[in-house]
Image: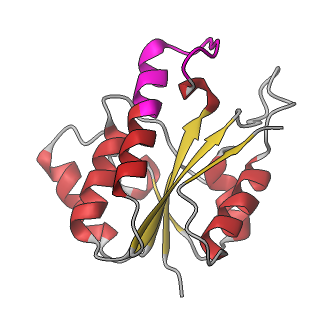
């Protein structure tokens, strides 16, 4: 049985809200659940390191600057012998693709993808999922993927007998 921890607050219209609908027993790492995922101090890192041991699936969905998504992935690799990490990337990470997002966002998403691919193995599965945007209810985002659609793909990846190191989805 999978024990899932997902970054993000399921009360907001994000990937976490879709994950909550598909995986109602999932737990969430966000400020309202006493996680400081910025990993700016040893206490925050120790809290994450201690708690991640209770899970075997981690959905790394929230972009946090300063390389925090990569840091969480590195910590999980140190703490788990087996498990599955789903890293949410962005089509903005594609070299040469026009993006209105800050360059640091694109650079850090590429770094997450590269780290995810390098850590993937038979026992420690990592899947890097590039998405074309989340329909978070804001104007102009209507044609992007709904959180529930993203969560359905996550379920497919987790349930698959295949090792899926990278998958890209766009609407």
Q: Is residue 76 left or right of residue 61?
A: left
Query: Between 63 and 27, which is closer to the camera in this rendering?
Result: 63
Please give left or right for residue 118 compared with residue 44 in the image: right
The residue under the point 58% across, 61% down is 164
Front-lying residue, 93 or 138: 93
Residue 99 in the image, given as x and y percentages of width and height = 62, 14
Q: Is residue 6 above or below residue 14?
A: below
Task: Verify whether residue 114 appears in magenta.
Answer: no
What colour-coding does the image apply? secondary structure
Please provide the residue range marked out in magenta: 95-110
The quadrant in which residue 140 appears is: top right
Residue 60 rendering spot, x and y as whole percentages: 47, 52
Residue 96 within the magenta-colored segment of the rendering: yes
- Residue furthest left in the image: 42
- Looking at the rendered structure, the number of numbered marks drawn on it comes to 0
Q: Is residue 12 left or right of residue 124?
A: right
Say which of 42 and 87 sits in front: 87
Residue 48: tell me if it is visible. no
């Amino acid at each position: 049985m999978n024990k899932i921890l997902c970054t993000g607050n399921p009360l907001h219209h994000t990937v976490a809200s879709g994950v909550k609908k598909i995986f109602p027993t999932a737990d969430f790492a966000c400020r309202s659940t006493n996680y400081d995922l910025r990993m700016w101090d040893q206490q925050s890192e120790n809290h994450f390191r201690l708690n991640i041991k209770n899970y075997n699936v981690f959905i790394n969905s929230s972009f946090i600057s300063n390389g925090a998504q990569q840091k969480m992935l590195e910590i999980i690799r140190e703490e788990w012998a087996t498990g599955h990490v789903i890293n949410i990337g962005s089509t903005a990470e594609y070299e040469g693709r026009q993006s209105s997002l800050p360059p640091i966002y694109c650079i850090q998403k590429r770094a997450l993808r590269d780290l995810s691919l390098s850590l993937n193995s038979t026992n420690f599965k990592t899947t890097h999922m590039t998405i074309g945007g989340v329909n978070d209810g804001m104007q102009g985002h209507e044609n992007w993927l709904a959180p529930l659609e993203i969560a359905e793909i996550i379920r497919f990846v987790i349930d698959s007998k295949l090792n899926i190191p990278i998958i890209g989805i766009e609407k």
